[in-house]
Image (cartoon, rainbow, N blue to C red):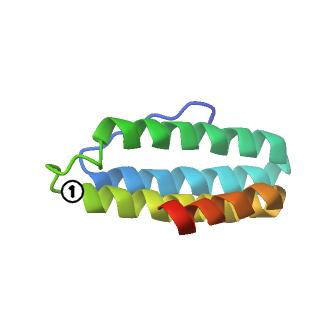
């Protein structure tokens, strides 16, 4: 069940690749079941977990040696997720793209 996610991470890269895997699972679930609403709910849950990770790891802290890696991974994940939203909710996807171009 994708409604709650758990991550087993030791590095930022592990988090990134686990998110990619979970995104892939959500897309496969949508393709198999054609239940877009459930798929988007699962994607929203993943975004919530990504936000928690981002907040916990504080890439804005200038003392972090890996802050650029965290920001780059997060930006890439947002771009990937916006492509999925674009299929179902074009207006939301446009807002995400605008925000990512202007603020990320």
In front of the other: 24 or 92: 92
- Residue 40 in which image quadrant: top right
Q: Which residue occupies the extreme top position in the image? A: 4
Q: Give the x, y percent position of residue 44.
A: 65, 41
Q: Quadrant of the N terminus?
A: top right
Is 92 placed left or right of 81 in the picture? right
Is 64 placed left or right of 75 in the picture? left
In front of the other: 2 or 72: 72
Q: Residue at x 72, y 49 (%)?
A: 29
Visible in this render: residue 15? yes
Q: How many marks do you count on the picture?
A: 1
> In this rendering, is residue 40 above or below 6?
below
Q: Give the x, y percent position of residue 86.
A: 76, 63
Residue denoted by label 1: 66
Q: Give the x, y percent position of residue 49.
A: 49, 37
Q: Give the x, y percent position of residue 61.
A: 23, 46
Is 59 placed left or right of 23 in the picture? left
- Residue 95 in which image quadrant: bottom right
In front of the other: 79 or 6: 79
Q: SS for tag 1?
A: loop
Q: Which residue occupies the extreme front position in the image? A: 102
């Amino acid at each position: 069940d994708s409604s709650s996610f758990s991550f087993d991470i030791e590095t930022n890269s592990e988090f990134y690749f686990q998110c990619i895997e979970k995104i892939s699972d959500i897309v496969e679930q949508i393709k198999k079941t054609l239940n877009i609403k459930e798929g988007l709910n699962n994607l929203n849950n993943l975004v919530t977990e990504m936000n928690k990770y981002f907040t916990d790891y504080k890439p804005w802290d200038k003392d972090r040696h890996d802050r650029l890696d965290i920001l780059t991974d997060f930006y890439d994940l947002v771009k990937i997720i916006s492509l999925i939203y674009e299929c179902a909710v074009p207006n939301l996807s446009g807002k995400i793209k605008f925000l990512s171009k202007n603020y990320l």
